[in-house]
Image (cartoon, grey):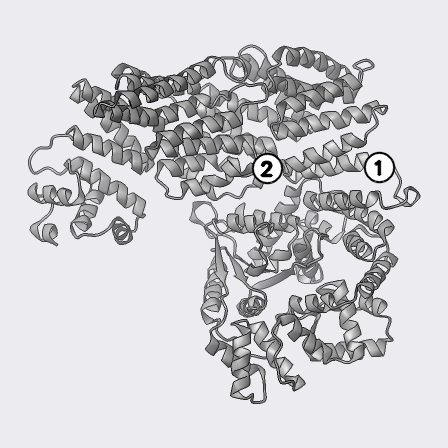
Amino acid sequence: MSQPSFSTPLIGRNPELARLSAVLERARAGDARAVLVAGDAGVGKSRVLGEAAGLAAAAGMTVLTGHCVDLGDVGLPYLPFTEVVGTLAADERFADVLAAHPVVGRLLGGGSDAVQDRLRLFEGFAGLLTDLADRAPVLLVLEDLHWADQSSRDLLRFLLSRGTLQRAAGGAPGHRLAVLASYRADDLHRRHPLRPLLAELVRLPVVERLELRPLADAEVTELVRHVQDRPLPDATVRRIVERAEGNAFYAEELVAATDTGGDGVPSGLADVLLIRFEQLSDTAQQVLRTAAVAGRRVEHDLLRGAVGLPEDELEAALREAVGRQLLLPGDGDTYAFRHALAREAVYADLLPGERARLHGAFARLLAARGRSRETAAERAHHSRESHDLTEALAASLEAAEHAHQVGAPAEELRHLETALDLWSSVEPSARPSGEGVDRVTLTLRASAAAAHAGAAHRAVALTRSALAGVRDSDHELAARVRYTLAGNLLGVDSLTAAFSYSSEALALIPADPPSRTWVWAAATHVLAARQVGENETALRVAHEALTVAERLQVPDARADLLISLAVLESGGRGTPEGRARLREAREVARGAGNAPVELRALFNLAIGCFESGELEESVSWLREGLERARRAGLSSSPYPLEMRYLHLLVLYTLGRWDECAAEDAAVLPAAGAFAAGPALYVGLARGDADIVERTRPLAEGPFDWMGRLVASIVLTDEAALRGDPRAAVERMRSGVAALTDDAGTLPDATVRLAALALAAVADRAAALRAAGDAEELSRWTDTAAELVELARVTAARGADGTSQGPEGRAWLARAEAEWTRAVSGPDAGAWAEAVAAFASGDGYERARCRLRYAEALLVADDREGAAAEASAARRTAARLGAVPLLERVDALIRRGRLAEQRSPGSSPLTAREQDVLGLLAAGRSNRQIGEELYITGKTASVHVSNILAKLGAASRTEAVAIAYREGLIGREEAVG
């Protein structure tokens, strides 16, 4: 854990270093933070991090550093974190802390048990950091994230978002921990896998981004003067500054290149690097070429074996390379290129045959050490690059097994796909042998890895590939491939195809004699049959399979079938009988140790309560389910993701919007982005200007049923609120079309989408009626009739064939009221029914209905009733911070003169509103009011709206005038 030393002072980075120093100081006080340091290659990221690490060490912090390494398309799972653990393991001071987290030790290859769930590994590493931070403040430095493997990215996501950096409950100090991580901004092309992670992380409140911009010309000039100990002509310095373009590494290399005595300066960095490289002796060049093939870092013994030089010649060459600062000695008898660009330039300059020969040498040297799984990924890389396909295949399979053991499904998938690519190029006699080592089984393994990594569509493609290679004469394997494909197809909402393949699976393997394969094929068929509306088939097969599962004593299959029956049989999961069966299934699955089936039971218990309007009980089941998923390491699997969405939806419905909106920054896998949907609903209701942009990935990305549902709701409502009925109807229709299954069954959400679109249609119809445009009005009333009929049909017979519950009925009531408003004008009775229908559900939607109810009462000349409904709607809107609704209610209150009458001299304002009024009179904007009163601009906006409504004012100026007239402010304030 020694800190780097530098021969030149840090130039031009004082503001950045001061910012990092402040982060370190806060971390030492228990305010954990993370900084993502971005910049182009060579701009000075490593230097700045090195200086920060030196400051941290001087202040008594434990500094841990991990490097990511470029190995092409071969990933070494958790490489930077393995380096950190290795550093700790080599230091006796940390032996007891490391021993307290044995699962982390497996990163070093210790222990033979597979790490079956990544959460244990992730939590173990997080626990290790926090235990270290309890002893002394910790700085974790991660360099070159642009080369990080997916598992390392996932672990970093976990550390930054799931509590490691969060403040403890009750305001107690948090962990004394800081994380500094660097990446090359110029390497991040549009599809670079780090980009979506960075977008997620920078939205976390504990994470900030620091961009290192190019140095100014004056700073580069100062750097050049310090780098070179002999004076350089001014013209040379100016040329170097011009060519360096603010890049510190360019500048240093250009200065070093002046030692050649050449007249010109190379125009490209690769030329600069190679000129410096060519200054070395032939032997030193040979050593560097060999080291470049090994990677950014190489062990001395491996380098000696690959280069084939006597020890004294190798040492002399290394001393020369180190003296020229092309290589740096490291811990553990290793050497590293001073900059990755130097290694890349040398590697690119190798001849193809030379490159292949050296890769082969490293592959043989690594194999001679013993075919450990820890080195398998490197052996696979070197073997493939040396065209030794037989060894590359064997090593890829070993690397896949190692990735599986350490819970790295993305890397497992990559190695398995490499093995599958190599399979046909290797003679059958030379291929690895053993049980499960055939093309079909390997493809199924790759499919499972893809599913675990969240690549649902890739899982489908791989299973289809397995199906193409399986022989139907092998009935059991053929059936397993087909029901696996059916399950994967359900995951991507290809329902008809899933039913077809589950049917084929059952036809291939007989029910007699009974077998586990048949039971699971039947359980999958039940799920698929239900999704395509074949409920009678699903019920029949479920009962038959349940009997077989009980006879064969397959408890987890029995639990899965009990869940299906609870959903399928009369009344469904919302009835006491259905819930009893689901609770039984939960206990059976728990006893069998099958967490995914247990989570399915908990999800159905939660959604059954939600559909029945029992929201608090739903929250209880969701909390249990999410905690169970966390403990099982399955938080990113399908049912927990749906539970996260449902949990936020319940919070949204209960009006606990701040809790809901706080989850907007929660880190989710790409396949689970829909889970943050209710936070989007909150953002729309609160008037967030970027709501369409935030929703766009769900609307335009790869099809995901839940993601498209969320996008359709947000975008339809957004168009309605914007007063664009054509866009609202178009969004509604396209959403329903996308969500309708292959059998033509409309989604239950059709009722909600129709009601939202009808609101915009009714607004347009009201305007046309007032303008006397009968022809255009007729077209829009026809549209309204079409939409309300769609809502009626869907509410009466939902996707499961039964009528919808309280939520669906409430949305239907709103749709009916909007339809009536469109065709004949506001109807107080219809809106009273809508308000009553939302009484035990969505408070925001009830407030929106109350606004319409107040409008209808005002038309009916029931001013007292209108004032009561408007006041109730206003209270809800203000409590939720729903500014657009608040503004519409206030407009109605002013227009209808529904404001409460006040006695002379009395103030209707609260103390905080009085403060806001004083600043309003002084001409402050909402943002300025917020800054002066230490509240947000949105909160200030709500207070201003409250003041306008209570004073019956149409503008800020009028509010100040009324306040002065009624003695609420003095003359000085009124004219100030």
Q: Is residue 329 left or right of residue 52?
A: right
Q: Quadrant of the C terminus?
A: bottom left
Q: Is residue 782 left or right of residue 265?
A: left
Dot label at residue 438? 1
Q: Quadrant of residue 944?
A: top left
Position of residue 283 measured from the top left corner of the image (x, y, whole percent): 81, 77
Mark 1 falls on what kind of element? Answer: loop
Q: Quadrant of residue 496?
A: top right
**Depth check, front residue: 723 or 777:** 777
Q: Is residue 858 left or right of residue 691?
A: left
* Disc nearer the start of the sequence (1/2): 1
Q: Which residue is mark 2?
A: 635
Q: Is residue 439 left or right of residue 8?
A: right
Position of residue 533 measured from the top left corner of the image (x, y, whole percent): 59, 15
Mark 2 falls on what kind of element? Answer: loop
The amino acid type, in three-letter code, at marker 1 is Asp
**Depth check, front residue: 457 or 865:** 457
- The answer to whether one can see residue 623 in this image is no
